Amino acid sequence: MTIDNFNFAGKKAIVRVDFNVPLDENGKITDDTRIRGALPTLKKILADGGSLIIMSHMGKPKGKVNPKMSLSQIKEAVAAALGAPVEFAEDCAKAADKAAALKPGEVLLLENLRFYPEEEGKPVGIDKEDPAYDAAKKEMKDRQKEFAKTLASYADVYVNDAFGTAHRRHASTAVVADYFDADHKMLGYLMEREVKAVDNILKDIKRPFTAIMGGSKVSTKIGIIENLMDKVDNLILCGGMTYTFAKAMGGNVGQSICETDKLDLALDIMKKAKEKGVNLVLGTDCIAADAFSNDANTQVCSVMDIPEGWEGLDAGPETRKLFADAIEGSKTILWNGPAGVFEFDNFTGGSRAIADAIVKATAEGAFSLVGGGDSVACVNKFGVADKVSYVSTGGGALLEAIEGKVLPGVAAVQA
Ligand code: AMP
């Protein structure tokens, strides 16, 4: 079923959203992007004459009640965004009466799902090495099913609009869907858009396809790098990874971030790129700093020859041009991870050069997808979020989808 084809009039919809919004020390929302992201779905249901049961996690309370992560703190903000009063259920597992009392156009917000260990379905307080672990895991999986069944019992229809957690098989993201038939479960609008954006990258590739992978480490990105190797024409590897490659090629990287146990992996990536005819673009020069600080002294140097006591914190001018040249002629672009320590204003240049080149290519007709927390922070910082084709709300979920993995949260509603 699709959300556009379903008439919610007189129906109760339980909707999994991602309201894991950042709060300040007074419990005030500092960035409401995620709430705004779910509004099209929530408003469609209300406009049809349906009632809403909204559920989400917030933070990592690890199966225990933690008032600092209570969704009651965002109840008023949700009400204001929806333009409707919101009732709150302190106990997700005992909300049947409140759900039953909902009239068309009314809204019930459930407490943080992760106050219940059943949500994640992982046994708590027992070590993986413990001989009793397997039994505890099985017991927790059974409890997870019960919890999901309870959630399902509140509603006639299930909508999943939480892309950020779609790579998890949690009670609210996937297991709950087992209690609805195919005509009564669907993706929300945000999820539909995310899934389509990934499809654009994976299935409908217009060439040349350039992927830009940055961030701090090779080790956390290796799965996606290997997967992309079969798909891309240009692969730009930047950020902290640069120095693992430089070291693997015999360079001196000074104090730069470097995974010395991943040198062989770096050489292997280079070899594979050559075999597959992928144009691997690595940084050649960098902005080296004499301290990990915005105010450090800097010099431009070769990534192969960084003086002792100095560390590469951003891509150098020659590198920026190499990256921009590869990006500007592209028709499909994926960007995940900054080219430098962009949190320091003096080391944003490399990431900015990438963002500018993506904006230019997009204006010339390329499809560009930016995803992962830090690259999203970059496009927001540079004010270009609306000049790329799609900014994904997912970090881990996006990377897993692009690695070619099936997302449990998507599969469960499409089953
Ligand atoms: P990741 O979480 O792996 O995507 O990495 C993002 C982080 O990588 C950001 O916080 C950046 O500051 C950091 N980063 C990027 N380039 C460098 C670098 N040259 N040295 C240290 N950290 C870096």
Image (cartoon, helix red, strand yellow):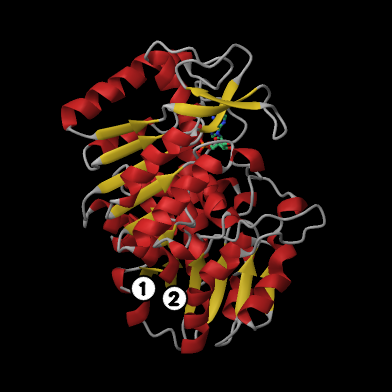
- Whether ligand 1 has any atom under 8 Å from the Cβ at mark 2 is answered as no
Question: In the rendered image, is residue 124 in sight?
Answer: yes
Label 1 close to label 2 by CB (< 8 Å) = yes
Residue depicted at x 41% and y 47%:
335
Which quadrant would the C terminus be assigned to in this image? bottom left
Residue depicted at x 69% and y 26%:
297
The number of numbered discs placed on residues in the rendered structure image is 2
Residue depicted at x 41% and y 51%:
357
Q: Position of residue 277 (x, y in %)?
A: 17, 33
Q: Give the label on residue 184, or none.
A: 1
Which quadrant would the N terminus be assigned to in this image? bottom left
Q: Is residue 326 above or below residue 255?
A: below
Assign a secondary structure to mark 2.
loop
Q: Position of residue 379 (x, y in %)?
A: 52, 54
First in residue order: circle 1 vs circle 2: 2
Q: Disc 1 to disc 2, how far (Cα)?
A: 7 Å
Q: Position of residue 81 (x, y in %)?
A: 64, 76
Assign a secondary structure to mark 1.
helix
Left or right side of 147 for 190: left
Instruction: Name which residue type carries label 2.
Output: Asp
Q: Tell me the crowding category of disc 2: few under 14, some 14 to 19, or many 20 or more residues within 10 angstroms, Cα based.
A: some
Of residues 240 and 285, the one drawn nearer to the viewer in this rendering: 285
Q: Give the label on residue 156, or none.
A: 2
Instruction: Name which residue type carries label 1.
Output: His
Of residues 373 and 355, the one drawn nearer to the viewer in this rendering: 355
Q: Tell me the crowding category of disc 1: few under 14, some 14 to 19, or many 20 or more residues within 10 angstroms, Cα based.
A: some
